Image (cartoon, rainbow, N blue to C red):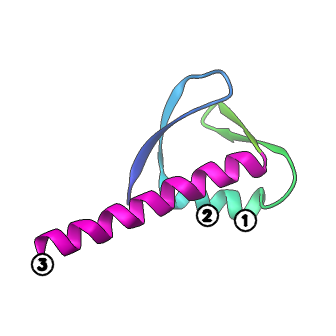
Amino acid sequence: MKKILIKDDKGKEIEVDLDKFINHINQFHKTGTSIHDENGHYFTVDDNFRKKLFEIKKNELNFNSRLKLFYS
């Protein structure tokens, strides 16, 4: 359970669980452009937004892999 801070459409930060957030986006906002409401914080979900989320996830996975190598 990795918590991250992301900015909503108004530039306010909110903490979300990265995996749960991505799963929800994949389930309900997989294509096109839509608005996601996260506890009163609104996000315009489009290809750009989805790409940024997946980059964050990819970077997290790469970081965890490097940590495992470092501590092995």
Q: Quadrant of residue 34?
A: top right
Residue 57: % across, % down: 49, 59
- Label 1 belongs to which residue? 27
Q: Amino acid at mark 3?
A: Ser
Mark 2 crowd level (few <14, some 14–19, many ≥20, 10 Å Cα): few
How many numbered discs? Answer: 3
As drawn, the residue found furthest toward the bottom would be 72
Local SS, label 2: helix
Q: Cβ–Cβ below 8 Å for labels 2 and 1?
A: yes
Q: Amino acid at mark 1?
A: Gln
- Label 3 belongs to which residue? 72
Local SS, label 3: loop
Q: In the image, 67: left or right of 11?
A: left
Query: Which SS does the magenta portion mostly show?
Result: helix
As drawn, the residue found furthest toward the right would be 32
Rounded to the nearest angstrom, the CA distance separating label 2 from label 1 is 6 Å
Q: In the image, 3: left or right of 46?
A: left
Whichever of labels 3 and 2 marks the residue nearer the N terminus, that label is: 2
Foreground pick, 17 / 40: 17
Q: Quadrant of residue 29?
A: bottom right
Q: Cβ–Cβ below 8 Å for labels 1 and 3?
A: no
Q: Quadrant of residue 12?
A: top right
Q: Amino acid at mark 2?
A: Asn
- Label 2 belongs to which residue? 23
Magenta residues span: 46-72
